[in-house]
Image (spheres, rainbow, N blue to C red):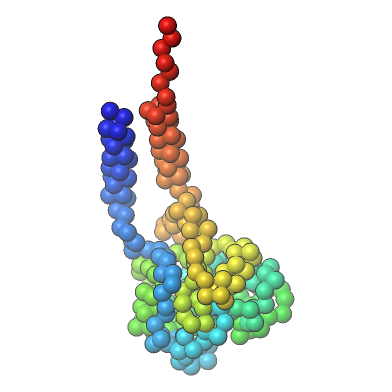
């Protein structure tokens, strides 16, 4: 009887999860987000355009642990706070950018050109209040074919909305061999997160970031173009967890023997 009740409970939980999934229109990856491709390698035929208008091979630039920041420079939403946070973590980190690691900003919008990239590069470098190697954080653009190759390879999915795009953000770390090793999701980064990602990327190690948990707790609001705390999802998981604990306690607790 106990086993029957437990099986019924598990079926109820599964059906509840499926119902919520269908209600929210969820798919295994979805149309918008950054979906991890750990241990996969960047294609060797991706070409990007530097601030001088020169076409360069992306993989040829990977001579040290590299963080890819996929953005678009006209973005009215999260790209600005995202890149500001990148500048802050570069400022606060004890690692030396250009020596220990590098950052490559790449616009996925093929209509943007080198002039716009150069202006953004200058603006965000000015936010860093210490001397840095300007080659350590470089800004690029690309064409539509190479943009698709790159975004597909790293799991960056977005949607056009009028003249702009709906998307999320992450720092995506790759080794000097082009191996994807770690994702730092969101728009805020701690120096320790950066250091751990750089050190493990240098060693060729890969692993999911704790910020993946944060991406579960926060959802991207496309109308407000910001991250919001998903109260319903988190509260539902907590309530379900305690409900299961209470149920199992009531079902599995030993019965007291009757006294004479």
Rendered residue at 44%/57% (across/down): 220
Residue 113 in view: no
In the displayed image of the protein, which residue is found farthest to the top?
A: 260
Q: Nearer the viewer, residue 229 or 8?
A: 8
Rendered residue at 64%/72% (across/down): 90
State the quadrant of the C terminus. Answer: top left
| Callout count | 0
In the displayed image of the protein, which residue is found farthest to the front?
A: 260
Lateral position of residue 56 relative to residue 125, left or right: left
Answer with the quarter of the image where residue 162 lies. bottom left
In the displayed image of the protein, which residue is found farthest to the right?
A: 130
Does 200 sit above or below residue 228? below
State the quadrant of the N terminus. Answer: top left
Residue 230 placement (x, y as % from top left): 45, 48
Residue 17 in view: yes
Residue 46 placement (x, y as % from top left): 41, 85
Q: Nearer the viewer, residue 211 or 7?
A: 7
Does 85 sit above or below residue 120? above
Does 249 sit above or below residue 169? above
Residue 100 placement (x, y as % from top left): 63, 79
Answer with the quarter of the image where residue 135 lies. bottom right
Lateral position of residue 31 relative to residue 198, left or right: left
Lateral position of residue 225 relative to residue 101, left or right: left
Rendered residue at 41%/41% (across/down): 236
Residue 191 placement (x, y as % from top left): 64, 65
């Amino acid at each position: 009887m106990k086993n029957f009740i437990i099986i019924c409970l598990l079926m109820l939980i599964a059906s509840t999860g499926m119902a919520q999934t269908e209600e929210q229109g969820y798919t295994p990856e979805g149309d918008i987000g950054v979906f991890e491709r750990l241990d996969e390698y960047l294609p060797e035929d991706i070409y990007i355009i530097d601030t001088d208008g020169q076409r360069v091979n992306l993989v040829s630039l990977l001579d040290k642990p590299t963080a890819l920041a996929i953005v678009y420079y006209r973005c009215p939403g999260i790209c600005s706070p995202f890149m500001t946070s990148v500048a802050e973590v570069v400022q606060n980190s004890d690692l030396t950018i250009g020596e220990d690691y590098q950052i490559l900003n790449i616009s996925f919008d093929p209509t943007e050109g080198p002039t716009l990239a150069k202006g953004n590069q200058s603006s965000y470098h000015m936010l860093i209040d210490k001397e840095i190697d300007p080659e350590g954080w470089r800004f690029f653009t690309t064409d539509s074919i190479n943009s698709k190759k790159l975004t597909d390879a790293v799991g960056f999915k977005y949607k056009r909305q009028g003249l702009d795009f709906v998307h999320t953000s992450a720092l995506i770390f790759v080794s000097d061999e082009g191996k994807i090793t770690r994702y730092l999701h969101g728009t805020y980064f701690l120096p320790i997160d950066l250091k751990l990602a750089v050190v493990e990327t240098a060693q060729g190690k890969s692993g999911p970031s704790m910020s993946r948990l944060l991406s579960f707790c926060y959802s991207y609001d496309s109308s407000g173009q910001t991250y919001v705390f998903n109260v319903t999802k988190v509260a539902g998981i907590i309530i379900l967890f305690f409900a299961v604990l209470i149920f199992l306690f009531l079902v599995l607790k030993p019965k007291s023997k009757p006294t004479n």
